[in-house]
Image (spheres, helix red, strand yellow):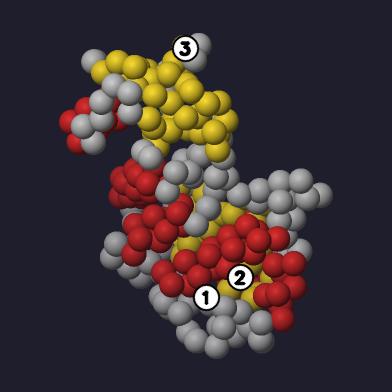
């Protein structure tokens, strides 16, 4: 079933009016017809709807309110060191599929990529579009936010306000710390996950994030590429949360 996100003011009573590019997509790409069903996500929940009319806008009627919510009961934020080439696009796509609430691109000491302000803005716009597309495909109830590119210092400051900071690092000792960190995750928490660039973290960066409360963890005995480490970390957290943390936990 296809999923679309409601724009502000698009709901009138028990009807949604889908316009612009989504309207074109429904009519000319998906070639949906009156009577077909789809999901409209609005305010963190998805409503089951049926198409009633297709014109300049696609009019759909809600047949089941609060049909589903795919949000995790824990907000996961990926602090991703800027990688080379188009790796960030893959990372954002998979982060959204795995339930991340947001992605924060971070300039680190070993970041090869250097972006000026104009390039940063255009990249974030592109990355946000990828996040929206991934959210539609994976039937997310919200579109995760891709934040502006930030410095490492500001990233650590932002993460320090969260309930838990995880730092996968090749110098971590064993999986015990990883197990203990996962067990501390409870419903309603916000969790920041720091991933280094291709060259990894500098020692000073590890000192900064651990001084802010970051917990160094291991992802296993193998050295992972930055994009693999991001996906593995989010998948690990997502699976643990889905299996062990409910919306009713305190």
- Quarter-wise, where is residue 122 in the image? top left
The N terminus is located in which quarter? top left
Q: Are marks 3 and 2 in contact (CB under 8 Å)?
A: no
Label 1 – label 3 distance at C-alpha: 51 Å
Label 2 – label 1 distance at C-alpha: 10 Å
**Residue 37's x, y, as percent?**
38, 30
Which mark, by number, is residue 151? none
Asked whether residue 16 is in view, the answer is yes
Where disc 2 sits, the SS reads strand
Q: Residue at 52%, 49% (x, y): give it.
A: 102
**Residue indicated by mark 2:** 167
Which mark, by number, is residue 201? 1
| Vertical arrangement, residue 56 with respect to residue 138, above or below | above
> Mark 2 or mark 3, which is nearer the start of the sequence?
3
- How dense is the environment of label 3, judged by Cα within 10 Å: few (below 14), some, or many (20 and up)? few
- How dense is the environment of label 2, judged by Cα within 10 Å: few (below 14), some, or many (20 and up)? many
Question: Would residue 7 be found to the left or right of residue 201 on screen?
Answer: left
Q: Which one is nearer the viewer's eye here, 220 or 28?
A: 28
Where disc 1 sits, the SS reads loop
**Residue 221's x, y, as percent?**
55, 88
Q: Residue at 47%, 21% (x, y): give it.
A: 62
Which mark lies nearer to you, 1 or 3?
3
Q: Which one is nearer the viewer's eye here, 180 or 57?
A: 57
**Residue indicated by mark 3:** 12
Which mark lies nearer to you, 3 or 2?
3
Q: Do the residues labelled 2 and 1 touch (CB within 8 Å)?
A: yes
Asked whether residue 154 is in view, the answer is no
| Vertical arrangement, residue 20 with respect to residue 155, above or below | above
Label 3 – label 2 distance at C-alpha: 45 Å
Q: Which one is nearer the viewer's eye here, 204 or 192?
A: 192
Q: Which one is nearer the viewer's eye here, 68 or 132?
A: 68
Question: Would residue 119 be found to the left or right of residue 6 on screen?
Answer: left
């Amino acid at each position: 079933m296809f999923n679309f996100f409601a724009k502000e003011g698009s709901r009138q009573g028990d009807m949604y009016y889908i316009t612009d590019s989504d309207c074109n997509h429904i009519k000319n790409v998906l070639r949906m017809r009156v009577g077909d069903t789809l999901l409209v996500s609005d305010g963190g929940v998805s409503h089951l709807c049926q198409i009633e009319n297709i014109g300049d806008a696609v009019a759909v009627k809600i047949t089941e309110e609060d049909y589903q919510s795919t949000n995790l009961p824990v907000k996961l934020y990926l602090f991703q060191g800027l990688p080379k080439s188009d790796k960030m696009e893959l990372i954002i796509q998979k982060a959204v599929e795995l339930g991340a609430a947001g992605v924060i691109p971070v300039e680190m000491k070993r970041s090869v990529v250097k972006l000026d302000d104009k390039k940063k803005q255009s990249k974030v716009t592109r990355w946000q579009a990828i996040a929206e597309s991934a959210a539609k495909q994976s039937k997310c109830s919200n579109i995760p936010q891709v934040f502006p590119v930030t410095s490492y210092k500001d990233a650590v400051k932002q993460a320090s306000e969260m309930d838990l900071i995880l730092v996968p690092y090749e110098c971590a000792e064993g999986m015990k710390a990883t197990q203990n960190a996962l067990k501390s995750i409870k419903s309603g928490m916000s969790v920041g996950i720091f991933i280094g660039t291709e060259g990894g973290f500098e020692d000073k960066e590890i000192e900064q994030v651990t001084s802010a409360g970051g917990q160094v963890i291991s992802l296993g005995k193998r050295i992972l590429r930055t994009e693999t480490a991001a996906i593995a970390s989010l998948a690990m957290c997502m699976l643990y949360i889905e299996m062990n943390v409910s919306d009713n936990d305190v």
